[in-house]
Image: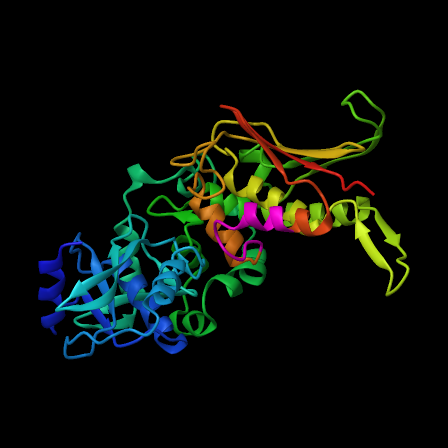
Amino acid sequence: MDITKLETLLDNFESDLAERKESWSNSTSTEICKAICAFSNDLPNHSEPGYVFVGVKDNGQPVSLRDPEKALLDLGSIRSAGNILPLPVMNVELVELKGIQVLVAEVWPSQEPPVRYKGVTWIRVGSSKARATQEEERRLSEKRLSGQLSFDRRPLMGSSLSELDLASFRQNYLPFAIAPEVLEENQRTPEEQLASLRFLAAPDGLPTAAGLLFVGKDPQFRLPGAYIQFLRLDGLELTDPIVDQKDLTGTLSQQLTQIDEILKAHIRTTTEIPDTGPEIRRPDYPIQALQQVIRNAVMHRNYESSHAPIKIYWYTDRIEISNPGGLFGQVTPENYDRTTDYRNPEVAASLKTLGYVQRFGMGIQLARKAMHTNGNPSPEYQFYPEYLQVTLRSRTP
C-alpha cells in the first residue's frame, strides 16, 4: 500500500474513499462491513480502491490498537464470511502511519455490482454510508460488464420469463436474499427483483443460468447435465449388483434436499457398548462430510459445456463423488485446500443465501474434520482436466 496516499486520506475528512474506526469490536465490525460493501459498489465510479482504517480517530489521528494481530485476522475473515455478496476484492494489512500501527483494508470496486451486505446494498454518499435507493441499484446493475460475466450470470438464449417459477421465487428464495424492510420499501416488480439478484438479464429480460438453476420450472430442459446421479452398489466394482439408483432433478435446492434424505437413509450406524459410560453410536460415514463434498460439487461443477451429472457412487467400502469440470482459476492440486476460486459465483452466492454454505472456503476443512472425528480416513482428492473426484472411505469398526 502507498503510505503517502494513506496518510493523505487520513487527513482528508471530506473524501468518500476513506472510512475511519477507532477500534475493532462487534459493533464497529457491522459498520466496517457496510463500508466495504459501499466501496465495492463504487457508485461515484472512482475506479480506484477505498480504504477502511481501524485504529484511527474521526480527526485522523491514529491510536494504538489492542491486539492488532487478532483484529487483522478478524478483518481479513470478512471477505470469506459470505455476508457480503458477491465476495469483495480486498487486501488487509497492518501499516505504520504517523508512527503508529494502523489496520487498513484496501477495497477494490467490484466488476459485478450491486454488492450487498446481508441483503442490503450500501453506497458512499460523500464521507458517509447510505442504503442505495431503487434508482441507485439500477445504476449499479447497469455498471456490470457483460463481456466479463461468468456462465451462471449470462442469459440463456431462447429461454423466457415463463420458464421461471415466480411463486417459488417469492416464497422460497426472495425472503432469504433481500432484507424484509428493503422489500417493503421498494415494491419492485418480480422482473426487477429477479434482475437485481442476477436471475434475469437486462435489458433482454432473459433468465440467466443461475435463475434457471434456482427458480426454474424445468432447469434440465436448458441445462441437461444439471442433475445428481446416485448409485448404491453391493460390492467393490461398478459391475456389482445395484442396490439403489436415482437421478435427482429439479432446482439445485430440490436436488440437495433429496440427496440429504437419500444419504440419511443409506448411512448405517453401529452401537459400541464400552465397559463404563454410555453407549457410543457411530455412522459408517458422517453426514456432515458427505454434505460438504456434495455441495462443493454442486457449487464448482462445469454447467456450461458438460452434460455429465454429478455422480455419487456408493460401494461397500467407499463413496466416490465426481463432478464435471477440473480445478478453476487460481486453484491448483497443490493449494486446493487453502485457495478458493469460483467458476459459478452466483451459484455460490445463492447456496450461501439459502443456508447450504455457512462460510466460503471451509468445505474441505469441515469434511476432513467430520471424517477424522468419526474415525474415517481423510477424503482423497483426484484431479483431472475434465473432472474432479473425491473418495470417502468407510470407517473401520
Above or below — where is 151 with respect to 349? above
**Horizontal side of residue 200 vs 228, given as left or right:** left
Quarter of the rendering containing residue 91: bottom left
The image's colouring method is: rainbow
Above or below — where is 53 with respect to 259? below
Quarter of the rendering containing residue 101: bottom left
Along the viewing direction, whichever of 177 and 240 lies nearer the viewer: 240
**Bounds of the magenta segment:** 356-369
The quarter of the rendered structure image containing the N terminus is bottom left
The quarter of the rendered structure image containing the C terminus is top right
The residue shown at (40%, 40%) is 154
Along the viewing direction, whichever of 331 and 152 lies nearer the viewer: 331
From the top left corner, tell me how far across and down residue 23 is, in percent: 30, 76
The residue shown at (21%, 76%) is 63
The residue shown at (13%, 69%) is 10
**Horizontal side of residue 70 vs 369, given as left or right:** left
The reply to whether the magenta stretch includes residue 321 is: no
From the top left corner, tell me how far across and down residue 89 is, in percent: 31, 51
